[in-house]
Amino acid sequence: MAARPDPVREPEAPLPAPPRAFIEATGLVKRLGGHAVLDGASIRLLVGETLAILGRSGEGKSVLLKHLAGLMNPDSGSVRIDGEEIVGIDERRLGPVRRKFGLLFQNGALFDSFDVEENVAFPLVELGLRDPVVIRQRVLAALEAVGMAEHRHKMPVHLSGGQRKRVALARAIITQPRCLLYDEPTAGLDPIGTANIDRLIRGFQQRFQVTSLVITHDLKTVERIADRVAFLRAGRVHFLGTPAEFFTTGDPVLRQFLDGRPDEGETA
């Protein structure tokens, strides 16, 4: 009797590639005024994700963001952007790295003497773009993306807080950055304004696969936008996980923050 042929084996599917880090910071230490604002902080921001960073006031969140964007140098530690080490490199080499980022600061940081259109166009002019037709087209596209095209000739003083944030967001995306960094993007906004900004942040990630890091105190914002959550404490990352893990944690430090409980012995 003839031997049966071995069954044909289907080729095994290749394993998915591990997620790649756009930003990888390791062991960051930064002392300001004799105080260790960062004391060994390490974090990875994965390509295409939205990472929310939380923590009590004064724990170094904004200082960490400035290190990740190459705006500050640590006393020690490493920051790699898209695989490139940026700690200690000169300003000439830092320029192309910084252009990978769009930044939205807490107060919007609009120029009061420029109208909305001029504010949004500013990064393009700084990059050397001179064609007024191209600049106008790109500005209008950015303003339309945030629902502010009809306000393009207004001065910042005539905008509401939410509108100022939208204009600042349009300016942050005008150069089509690979990564957006937000420092308290919903601070000072009412619940509707906050929800609108959250929708824009999530929409940019989904439409353009932009990588995002968001510093916030707003737990509703975290629920709406975050793929992962990091909690900063004493200059280090105390927690890193999914929003579900964060909100259901039994960690006493996190529970105090989540429940809004004062420190022991603190009086009203």
Image (cartoon, helix red, strand yellow):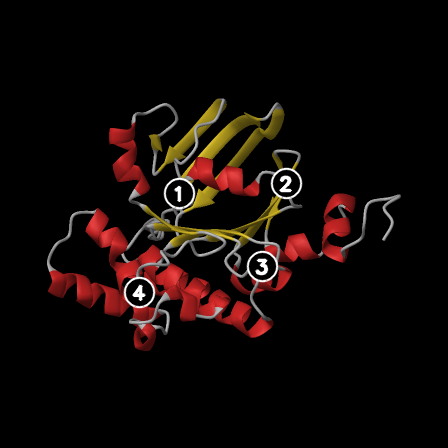
Assess disc 2: are there few (<14), some (14-19) or many (≥20) residues with their C-alpha within 10 Å of its C-alpha. few
Q: Are marks 4 and 1 in contact (CB under 8 Å)?
A: no
Hey, what amino acid is under mark 2? Answer: Gly
Of the residues tagged 3 and 4, which is closer to the observer?
4
Distance between the Cα atoms at labels 3 and 4? Answer: 32 Å
Q: CA distance from mark 2 to mark 1?
A: 30 Å
152 lies above or below 42: below
Eye-nearest disc, 1 or 3: 3
Query: In this orientation, which residue lies closer to the viewer: 268 or 252?
Result: 268
Give, as a three-letter code, the residue at label 1. Arg
For marks 1 and 3 on the same chain, the one whose residue lies earlier in the sequence: 1
Frontmost of labels 3 and 2 is 2
* Lower position in the chain sequence, tag 3 or tag 2: 2
The label shown at residue 222 is 3
Q: Which residue is mark 4?
A: 115
Residue occupying the point 59% across, 26% down: 33
Residue in view at x 61 percent, y 23 percent: 34
Q: How far is mark 1 from mark 3, CA to CA?
A: 22 Å
Q: Badge 1: few (under 14), some or many (20 or more) residues near its Cα, within 10 Å? A: some
Question: Which x, y percent locates residue 8?
Answer: 33, 52
Is residue 175 visible in this depiction of the protein?
A: no
Local SS, label 3 = helix
Looking at the image, which is closer to me, 41 or 131? 131
Q: What's the CA distance linking mark 3 and mark 2?
A: 19 Å
Residue to which mark 1 is pinned: 20
Would you say the residues marked 2 and 1 are in contact, meaning their CB atoms lie under 8 Å apart? Answer: no
Kindly identify the amino acid type of the residue bearing the numbered disc 4. Answer: Asp
Q: Earlier in the sequence, mark 2 or mark 1?
A: 1
